[in-house]
Amino acid sequence: MQFIDLENWNRKEHFEFFSSLKSAYFGFTTEVDCTLAYEHAKRNRHSFFAYYIHKSMVAINTVDALKLRIVDDKIALFDTVHVGSTIGRSDGTFGFSYFEYAEDFSVFNERLQEQISTVQNSKGLGIKNETLPPNHIRHTTIPWHSFTSILHPTDFDPKESIPKIAFGKFSIRDGKKVMPVSIEAHHGLADGIDLAKYFNAFQNELDKQ
């Protein structure tokens, strides 16, 4: 982790302006082509959920702006961002999960499956967000429907700086599987170009075999 020199940062005015708002978050929803990724996951008997979450994390860790966090009123750039995700239960509730990111999918998947088991055998929300390290990113999945937009809850804290990503149910169009993905981030730390970098990297990862 390293701290950004705010006075000499080319985003100083951007950061100060958006941090003065009650909610500094912005974002958009688009679609990714997950045809090849789905086929690869099923061919190798992997959970598609685990597979695309891993691909998302690989992409996130290539974009420095999405690894920036506000820590003790300073801006910190972390080397690695880890995983936060909601996990559903059979009773219709969900719990929060957290585990460390790994580039190796088998290691990543093992950690994810441990969290799934823990959450599904518990009640309530489980992990409290305030206990998690700032260098994670929040994922949630809406597996029942596709969507074109999504609204996240917020406490309107301008120092909240953890990005949020949501995945929807893929649909089939022209023989391709397309999945809606929404991302939100603190606008003082990231711009539209940075979110576009994430989507480009995510699509490239989904296309790898």
Image (tube, helix red, strand yellow):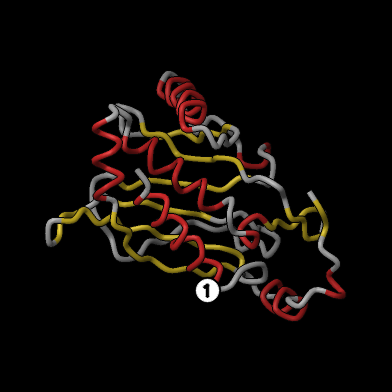
Rendering coords of residue 82 (x, y %): 60, 41
Q: For mark 1, does the 10 Å Cα neighbourhood hold few (<14), some (14 to 19), or many (20 or more) residues?
A: some
Rendering coords of residue 43 (x, y %): 24, 32
Amino acid at dot 1: Gly
Going 50% across and 31% down the picture, which residue do you hit?
Answer: 108
Rendered view: 185 above or below 110: below
Question: Which quadrant of the figure has residue 64?
Answer: bottom right
Rendering coords of residue 147 (x, y %): 28, 60
Disc 1 secondary structure class: helix
Say left or right for 113 vs 209: right
Say left or right for 139 vs 74: left
In the current view of this chain or complex, which residue is farthest to the left? 174
Rendering coords of residue 31 (x, y %): 32, 62
Question: Which quadrant of the figure has residue 185?
Answer: bottom right
According to the picture, the residue beneath numbered tag 1 turns out to be 192
* Between 151 and 177, the one nearer to me in the picture: 177
Going 61% across and 63% down the picture, which residue do you hit?
Answer: 156
Q: How many marks?
A: 1
* Between 103 and 90, the one nearer to me in the picture: 103
**Quadrant the C terminus occupies:** top left
* Between 209 and 146, the one nearer to me in the picture: 209
